[in-house]
Image (cartoon, rainbow, N blue to C red):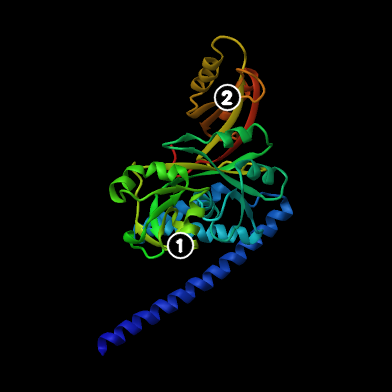
């Protein structure tokens, strides 16, 4: 009996702490709304990535390792995004359907409070943002195993948008079904890429069970929800969305599979101090043109993160290069380097400067 009283006392203390947290959260969101009104009056951007980075750094320092850091950052990410979105509801277009990895990346970046709008193609995501029908879009740009997503790169050549941010999402493939029992699975459905990335595991653990390629991991999850004999390879978000049970986690043949997603909008954010700048350039038709570009970056001590070429549609043997470098266009060295690049290029377009993913490069 005394033990039960102690448990009750501690639970009452937890309830009191929860009420304090709730009260402080309500105060915080009111402060965020006040800042939003002040920024409206001065025409300042509502998103200040440098300020957010400072908050995360201060919280980690104050925590002193007591609360698990990953969970702490996740909690404050949701608090910060919810408060920012309270200033103005944000709608995000993404490569659908619901519960795909792109949808999951959007939730990881913008939080649960944003409104998400699924699109049927990457091209449509770009069009929605350019036309102003949604404020942001999120699209995959490269995968650590499969390489570049060419439809995203090609869309940058068609639409007038800016890159606003990036997120790198570890891709973990889960085998799921309604019951959670492997013996109930008579067919495994998923998008062709996850099926290929889990081929050896499926061959070893489900020999003789046929696979069924479908439009998306989300479509496979929906099929599994409707049929007890179908298993799906799906995202963690699809599991929650369609109320499925996990049979086995992490069935991919190669660990470390990561996809980089870009957040696109009409305007890039201000300098955060931990940024990346992306360009689209065409080279002059002369020997050593690419070497000239690389020499400019090297002479300015600018760190080149990525360079990728894509053919120009309708112009045989003409290519444009996508260039990612560390730094922001507001940094003097980046501005000077890009000014020189512009003079040395047959085509030049600044695609944006934005905060680098924390787990990046």
* Between 258 and 62, the one nearer to me in the picture: 258
Q: Taking 54 as reference, is 349 left or right?
A: right
Would residue 208 be found to the left or right of residue 19 on screen?
Answer: left
Q: Is 66 situated left or right of 215 in this image?
A: left
Q: Residue at x 67, y 45 (%)?
A: 129
Residue under circle 2? 337
Dot 2, crowdedness within 10 Å: few (<14), some or many (≥20)? some
Number of residues whose C-alpha sits closer than 10 Å to that of mark 1, classed few (under 14), some (14–19) or many (20 or more):
few
Q: Position of residue 91 (x, y in %)?
A: 64, 55
Q: Nearer the viewer, residue 204 or 59?
A: 204
Place of residue 340 in the rendered image (x, y in percent of width and height, measured from the top left): 61, 20
Measuring from the top left, give residue 2's x and y in whole percent.
26, 88
Mark 1 or mark 2: name the one nearer the start of the chain. Answer: 1
**Label 1: which residue?**
227
Tell me the tag on residue 60: none
Residue 195's place in the image compared with 160, above or below, is: below
């Amino acid at each position: 009996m005394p033990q039960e009283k102690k448990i009750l006392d501690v639970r009452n203390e937890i309830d009191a702490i929860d009420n304090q947290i709730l009260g402080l959260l309500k105060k915080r969101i009111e402060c965020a709304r006040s800042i939003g009104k002040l920024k409206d009056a001065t025409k300042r951007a509502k998103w200040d990535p440098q300020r957010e980075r400072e908050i995360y750094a201060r919280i980690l320092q104050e925590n002193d390792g007591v609360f698990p850091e990953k969970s702490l950052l996740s909690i404050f990410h949701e608090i910060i995004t919810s408060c920012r979105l309270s200033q103005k509801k944000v709608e995000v277009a993404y490569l659908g359907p619901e519960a795909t990895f792109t949808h999951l990346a959007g939730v990881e970046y913008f939080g649960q409070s944003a409104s998400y709008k699924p699109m049927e193609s990457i091209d449509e995501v770009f069009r929605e943002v350019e036309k102003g029908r949604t404020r942001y879009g999120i699209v995959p740009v490269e995968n650590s195993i499969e390489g570049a997503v060419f439809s995203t790169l090609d869309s940058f050549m068609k639409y007038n948008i800016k890159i606003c941010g990036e997120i790198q999402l570890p891709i973990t493939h889960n085998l799921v079904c309604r019951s959670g029992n492997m013996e109930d699975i008579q067919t495994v459905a998923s998008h062709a890429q996850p099926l290929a990335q889990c081929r050896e595991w499926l061959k070893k653990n489900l020999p003789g069970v046929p696979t069924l390629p479908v439009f998306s991991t989300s479509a496979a999850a929906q099929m599994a929800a409707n049929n007890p004999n179908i298993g799906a390879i799906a995202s963690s978000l699809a599991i929650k969305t369609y109320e499925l049970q996990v049979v086995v986690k992490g069935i991919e043949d190669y660990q470390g599979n990561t996809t980089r997603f870009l957040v696109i909008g009409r305007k890039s954010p201000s300098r955060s101090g931990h940024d990346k700048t992306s360009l689209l350039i065409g080279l002059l038709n002369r020997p050593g043109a690419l070497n000239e570009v690389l020499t400019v970056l090297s002479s300015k001590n600018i760190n080149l993160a990525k360079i990728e070429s894509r053919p120009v549609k309708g112009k045989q043997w003409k290519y444009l290069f996508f260039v990612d470098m560390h730094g922001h266009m507001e940094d003097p060295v980046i501005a000077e380097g890009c000014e020189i690049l512009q003079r040395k290029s047959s085509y030049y377009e600044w695609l944006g400067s934005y905060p680098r993913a924390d787990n990046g490069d």
